[in-house]
Image (spheres, rainbow, N blue to C red):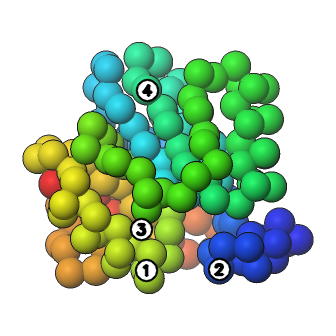
Amino acid sequence: MAMTAVCALWSRVPFVPTSGAIARTMIREAHLRPGDKVYDLGAGDGRLLILAQREEPTITAIGFEIVPVVWFFAQVRILLARSSARVYLKNSFRQDLQDADCILLYLIPAVLKTLALKFDRELKPGTRVISHAFSLPGRPATREVLVPRRFGKSKVYVYEW
């Protein structure tokens, strides 16, 4: 709870970890292939990147996180998992995404609106974008997957550029 409050004050975006069932669904829907370059924008504690690399060990897993405390937790989690995933303390909006094969997201709609424009400029055809809970404004999802939760369901949106 305190971590969420600190994150919201620092970046105007709360830190809400992705649950295991949703993370597994996101990775399954990403259809990772050997050698893929996978980005997690707003990587949080790195759990999606670690899971993605366990699923397909040959991927390059890179995340960007803007909140120093959360970034630190990602470093610890990656170290403990003995993963080669990397999470950088950087703003996702300033990163070149042209080489992405897959992008993982769990961000609020206001941020997704800006990212959708960036994706249109930078992503190569066929890049997969997987978003938890929120759709990309103005762009129809290729597929929507409902994930059962303790209290209701959550959606995973799958896009292909």
First-in-chain label (3 vs 2): 2
Give the answer, above or below, for where 34 lies relative to 19: above
- Residue 20 visible somewhere in the drawing: no
**Does the CB distance between marks 1 and 4 fall below 8 Å?**
no
**Does the CB distance between marks 3 and 4 fall below 8 Å?**
no
First-in-chain label (2 vs 4): 2
Residue placed under numbered mark 3 in the picture: 155
Of labels 1 and 3, the one closer to you: 1
Nearest the eye: 16 or 148:
16
**Residue 30, horizontal then vertical, whole percent:** 33, 42
Residue placed under numbered mark 2 in the picture: 12
Which element is circle 3 on?
Answer: strand
Give the answer, above or below, for where 66 lies relative to 46: below
**Residue 113, horizontal then vertical, whole percent:** 34, 78
Which amino acid, mark 3? Answer: Lys
First-in-chain label (3 vs 4): 4
Q: Which mark is residue 109?
A: 1
Of labels 2 and 1, the one closer to you: 2
Of labels 3 and 4, the one closer to you: 4
Residue shown at the point (41%, 68%) measured from the top left: 155
Position of 147 with respect to 80 (left or right) is: left
Residue placed under numbered mark 4 in the picture: 60
Distance, label 1 to label 3, CA atoms, is: 14 Å
Residue shown at the point (54%, 58%) measured from the top left: 91
